[in-house]
Amino acid sequence: MSSTISLMTQSSSRQFWLTRPFGERATQIFLGVLFAALLLVTVLHLALPQGHPLHVNAYTVNLFGKYLSYALLAVAVDLVWGYLGILSLGHGAFFAIGGYAMGMYLMRQIGDRGTYGDPVLPDFMVFLNWDSLPWYWLGFDMAWFAFAMVLLAPGLLALVFGFLAFRSRVTGVYLSIITQALTFALMLAFFRNEMGFGGNNGLTDFRELLGYNLRSNDTRLGLFIATGVALALGYILCRAIVTSKLGRVCVATRDAEARTRFIGYRVERFQLFVFVVSAMLAGLAGALYVPQVGIINPSEFSPIFSIEIVLWVALGGRATLYGAVIGAILVNYAKTIFTGVMPDAWLFALGAMFVLVTVLLPKGVAGLLLHLKRRKKSATLPKEATA
Amino acid sequence: MSLLQSLTTRDRVFDFMAPQASPVDVRHGPILYMEDVSVSFDGFKAINNLNLTIDDGELRCIIGPNGAGKTTMMDIITGKTRPNAGSVWFGSRHNLLQMNEPDIASLGIGRKFQKPTVFEALSVFENLELAMAADKRIFPTLTARITDEIKDRINEVLETIGLAELRYQPAGILSHGQKQWLEIGMLLMQRPRLLLVDEPVAGMTEQEMERTAELLTGLAGKQSVVVVEHDMGFVRSIARKVTVLHQGGVLAEGSMDQVSSDPKVVEVYLGADDEEAA
Ligand SMILES: Nc1ncnc2c1ncn2[C@@H]1O[C@H](COP(=O)(O)OP(=O)(O)OP(=O)(O)O)[C@@H](O)[C@H]1O
Ligand SMILES: [Mg+2]
């Protein structure tokens, strides 16, 4: 899998690391398909009248936007799991923290239009009889500060957590378990009212983002496009990392950690760096998700959600990045359909899908694509030879 | 060099451009010098008053029955095991007993372990690239480019280890023997002065052994090579000088013919081996 990728990088390895992915066929196809999809949805939404069979309504645009933010989250997980071998079962926590940072900004944008009409305090704080904002809510009325926190807060958590874990060489299944514990602990904390994040109900009733009304169709379309662009940028960043020498050190660490350390790389620092980058991307995904669904509550911290993300990546195919995108979109599309028909059976369906893919497509959908491509190539080769 | 110094000595501003002189001083004698070294594990003397000198550029074979202390000796040289007594010098300047493992490695002592581990998902070329002596911190690694100079160096090593044709293949598809050569290549990328090679031909086919013999004899001269090996045919094919270890000490030393006719050696080692072979 990664060997085919590494072959492709060989010719372009002399370029500047951030522009290197553009020389890759796989990235070009991915970006082409993504932008074509963004354009198509936009055109079908704006140009066709309501009631036209091909019209994409605002609800669907919104739904697609949600899928794209999940796709970005899956790319972040694939970066650490696929290339570095760190099976994080706690990435939902970084996603949720990014979401809460955005939610706090949106809460403060409500101003005095809440039920209680307090110019500063969000409704739930008035309800709790608080008379001032807790210190960690300060600054969130400023967009630049809130958007910085979208990246910095999950990044900082990942830095501290990763520093402790990787320094003591906690990897493998133990790391997976403590990442689950991390997200579970955060869920319990965020459930508590006195934490100041709205407890059980979380943050909701948002009105505006940067002055745009969140309930308008145009804002929804804008958020959908912004999420698509964020996915493209996140994807390019991840590809730039995995096609660099640092990416090769990651793969080396994944496959033979002690050996990598032995030839002089400070493995724990590489793990920490990539883990923090991944957490920040997950935070960004959460921040784009929240205004589109209109709420953030502690259920995003639930351990099962973090496991689900890993399933998307496994289904799509590890260590390809585009596989993660395919997996996230496919599974969530299936989820939308399934929960409409038989909501109780969704988890069973997910489990069955996972078992089937592991048995039939051990390398996921991306593995199937690569296999088909190779078959096609070997089928066309003899023809070329005779021609 | 301190900042102040570097500012005052204007003629040496571009230090990094000067060819790097090897810090190892071999003008006054051998590259490796071990004297009266002893190690005991829970009272059991694995190494017992061992004396050994390796000359610069020499190819030395070390043989000895199981448990003679060959691997332990390498552990001492590379800093993995600390001896209870004795001294170990690298050139005339570096006391290896006062250094830790990474420092010893960066000084130019490369070690190949018995079991080969290469990065299977990466290509042969990339395996060598990662092993190369370079700035191995995060950001230099992230922005590193493969310059022509680096490419030349990797190609040179690819030729030496005979894997030039397989450079873009993932290392995972290599045969056992080819993996061993790749490992030796990864050591060579760090431009070592002394190579320690533990049982390189175990599990190799006859042809692979021949190639390995060529490879190791080709390396000698450019760097010093110490080979631990059980296979007598192989040792005979490469050896110029052989050291026989037994119970943690040197039993005999000399050419293969001298050593194999030494009655002490025949008794503890070769005799038993020949009987087995017969
Ligand atoms: N860490 C250790 N603790 C206890 N005993 C050890 C340790 N390392 C080595 N020994 C013992 O020291 C002796 C020498 O071991 P060593 O591995 O150096 O032998 P060797 O010559 O490499 O043998 P072989 O040919 O089997 O590889 C053996 O009896 C071994 O059991
Ligand atoms: Mg041994």
Image: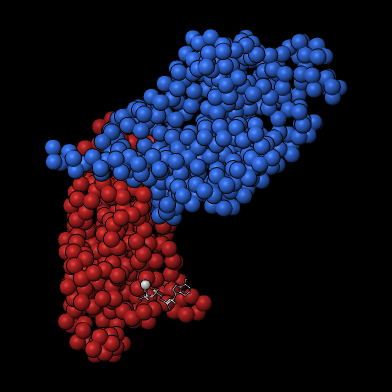
Chain colours: A blue, B red
Q: Nearer the viewer, residue B127 or A32?
A: A32
| Outermost residue to the left | A387
In the rendered image, is residue A104 in sight?
yes
* B141, above or below B241, in the image: above
Quadrant of the rendered image containing residue B76: bottom left
* A102, above or below B195, in the image: above
Q: Position of residue A227 (x, y in %)?
A: 52, 22
x 68%, y 14%: residue: A207
* B188, above or below A119, in the image: below
Q: Position of residue A329 (x, y in %)?
A: 52, 32
| Outermost residue to the right | A129
Q: Nearer the viewer, residue A261 or B244?
A: A261
Quadrant of the rendered image containing residue B17: top left
Q: Nearer the viewer, residue B4 or A267?
A: A267
Q: Answer with the quadrant where ligand 2 appears in the image.
A: bottom left
Q: Is residue A237 left or right of residue B222?
A: right
Q: Nearer the viewer, residue B259 or B18?
A: B259
Q: Is residue B204 left or right of residue B70?
A: left
Quadrant of the rendered image containing residue B53: bottom left
